[in-house]
Structure formats: structure tokens, C-alpha cells
Image (spheres, grey):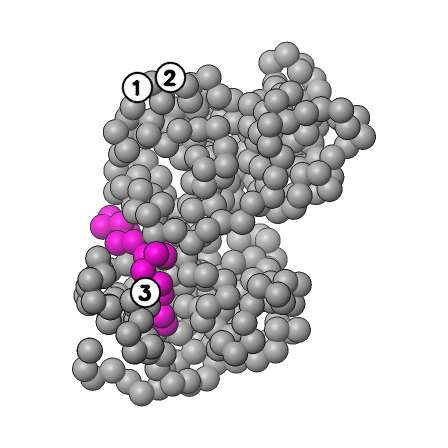
Amino acid sequence: MATNLPQNVRAVLQPDPKVDTLILTETALPMPKEGDTEEHLVQIKATSPCLSELTWERYFPEAFTTDRERVPGTEGAGVVVTAPARSPFKPGDEVYFRNHADRRGCLSDYTLINKSSLALKPKSQSWVEAAATPLSSLTAYQGLFEHGLLNPRAIVTQGGDAKAREANGKVRVLITAASGSVGSWAVQLAAAAGAGAIVAMSGPSKVDDVRKAGATDIIDYTKQSVADWAAQDPSSTQCDMALDCVGGDSLAGCWTAVREGGVLLSVSDSPDRVRPASVASKKLAKATWFLVQPRGSDLAEIAKVVDAGIGKPWIDSAVEFEDFQKAFDKVETRHAKGKVVIKITT
């Protein structure tokens, strides 16, 4: 057991899930239960707010336990302080993670993270970069490779399998909000896996960045909707899969853009809820809304991608712990140009 640990730590709490109010206070140092084989005490270096996370328990109360400390922040990076016996992680390891949403979060000096959620931090990343990576990269990774049509073994860090790359080269992928946190990772990972075409929906200010990330075609959403783009020449615009990161009209437009028998995924809403009447008879192999799973094994693969220089988070800004409210407010405006990070300990 580590020595010289504080009895109390700084933590930001959401006292009532029905309102978004946050308070900075001190709470008892969280400690693993005696004999627990999963929990690691981690000193948090940085964390990043997620859009609308303060509303999750309000709208999905059945997914949360009421006896936990409501500390927000589901992703972060830090240093392992205590680890259970036979854990692959040891005290002093630098790690990054996406914590389960129903657990005590990362907006605190210390918190507890399950072994299955942990991975060693990319060596090339700063704490701010590492804290900005897990949630968005995991969402894109699982969307493209677990729920989607691309094979991750084509990525050079996973062996660069020639057959996998040949198969991926036949896949046209559409990504909405491609300049956003999840979308930018999806573009980079699809390019790393050798997707045949990457159609990216983006605003004009980010077009150059999205192209550099690997997009082969751009839909400027200020000039053209996804549906209009797809309808202009169906023989050349049809995509094999779409990963939607917006919902609403963009998700509805993806129904027009995805070919018969293709795959439509969304992290924002159920595709069936917004299916246009004009494509009521279209049959897709899969049309689903999915939730990202905290999975350290996926983050370990993403760390290799980062350290190989073929993937990185897009970061808007970083603020000090005491300015946590500014970070949440900026995320909620939807005007942040990448992740907003809160630095916790130096």
C-alpha cells in the first residue's frame, strides 16, 4: 500500500443529477475495497469533459447507482498509485483510460479505475493530449472496426495485413462531423486502415485539416446536406458504411448516402427514428446506435497508433483545475475546436 497519501482530496461534485450545478469541495480519498482484484487508485493528471455528460443520469437514471460520489469526467490520464495483486499495471505506471459512466469520475486529485479500462499512456503524448484521447478515439475505433466494415489488422501497428488492407480498400466510408472530436479520429483511423474512400462532412474552416487527416472527399455542410450530396449522383456517391456523429438531419441524410445492404452507425441517435420516408424500403445490413465500451485493450492499440504518428487528438484548449466550469461551459457551446482539457495535478 502506498504511503503518504492524503486523507482528503479535491473533487468536483454534481450534488443533484437533475441540475447541472457543480461545486468544488474536499472528499475522502477513494480507496479500493479489501481484496478487490480490479480497482486501481490513480492520481489524475488531466481529464476532459464530454458534451452533455451532466445530463446522462437525468435522462438514463436506470444506468446509474445513487450511492456513488457524483464526480464527473469519464476520461483521463494519470499515474497508478496502488494496484491489486497480479495486475499488469504497477504503481508508477503512466496510464490513460475511459472510466465507466456510472463510476466516480476523474475531476478529482485521485479516483479508482478498473483494470479492464486501463492502458499505458502513449509515450509521445503529454498529459493534456493523453486526457483528450480515450473517449473520442475509442468511439471511432469501435465504430469503424467492431461495429463497422473495416479490419484493424490492416493498420501498420497491428501488422499491416495485406489481405485486410485490400479488403478495406474496397470500402467507402462516410463520416459526419469529421472535424469534431470523434469524427477527426474516425478519419485518421479509417485512413490508417486503408479505407478506399473517406467522405468527410465538415465546415469550411476545417477542410484543410480534415484532408490532411485522410479524407478523400469533403461535404461542406454550410453549402450542401448529406442527402443532397448523395442524391446528386447516386452511382458515384453511394457509401458502404456511414459513421454519424451528429444525429438529426445529417443522420437522416445518411440513409440516402449508404448503399443497399450497407451499414449505418450513429453515436447520437437511433437511425430508424429519423429514417426518411423516401428510403422506407431500403434494407441495410445494420442500422444502429451504439455506445462506446471502456476497453483498455482497444486503448492499447490506439496508443500504438499515436506513438507511430498516425493519429492524434484535436485539442481546443486546456484550463487549470479551478477553471473547471469554464471548460464545461465551452464544451456545451459546441463551438470548441477540439477537446477541452482540465489539468488536475502537476
The foreground one among 296 and 231 is 296
Kindly indicate the quadrant of the structure image that contains residue 159: top left
Residues drawn in magenta: 111-130
Left or right: residue 85 versus residue 36 is left
Q: Are marks 1 and 2 in contact (CB under 8 Å)?
A: yes
Q: Is residue 121 magenta?
A: yes
Q: Which residue is at 50% across, 66% downward?
A: 102
Q: CA distance from mark 3 to mark 2?
A: 40 Å
Q: Are marks 3 and 1 in contact (CB under 8 Å)?
A: no
Q: CA distance from mark 1 to mark 2?
A: 6 Å
Which type of secondary structure does the marked residue at label 3 adopt? loop
Which type of secondary structure does the marked residue at label 2 adopt? helix
Q: Which residue is at 48% across, 21% downward?
A: 171
Quadrant in which the N terminus is drawn: bottom left
Left or right: residue 81 versus residue 320 is left
Q: Are marks 3 and 2 in contact (CB under 8 Å)?
A: no
Q: Is residue 175 visible?
A: yes
Quadrant in which the C terminus is drawn: bottom left
Residue topped by disc 1: 162
Q: Amino acid at mark 3?
A: Glu
Kindly indicate the quadrant of the structure image that contains residue 308: top left
- Give the farthest residue toward the bottom: 7
Q: Is residue 25 magenta?
A: no
Residue 166 circle label: 2
Which type of secondary structure does the marked residue at label 1 adopt? helix
Q: What percent of the width, then of the height, locates residue 205?
A: 54, 38
Residue topped by disc 3: 38
Q: Is residue 249 visible?
A: no
Which class describes the residues within 10 Å of circle 3: few (<14), some (14-19), or many (20+)? Answer: some
Q: What percent of the width, then of the height, locates residue 139?
A: 47, 45
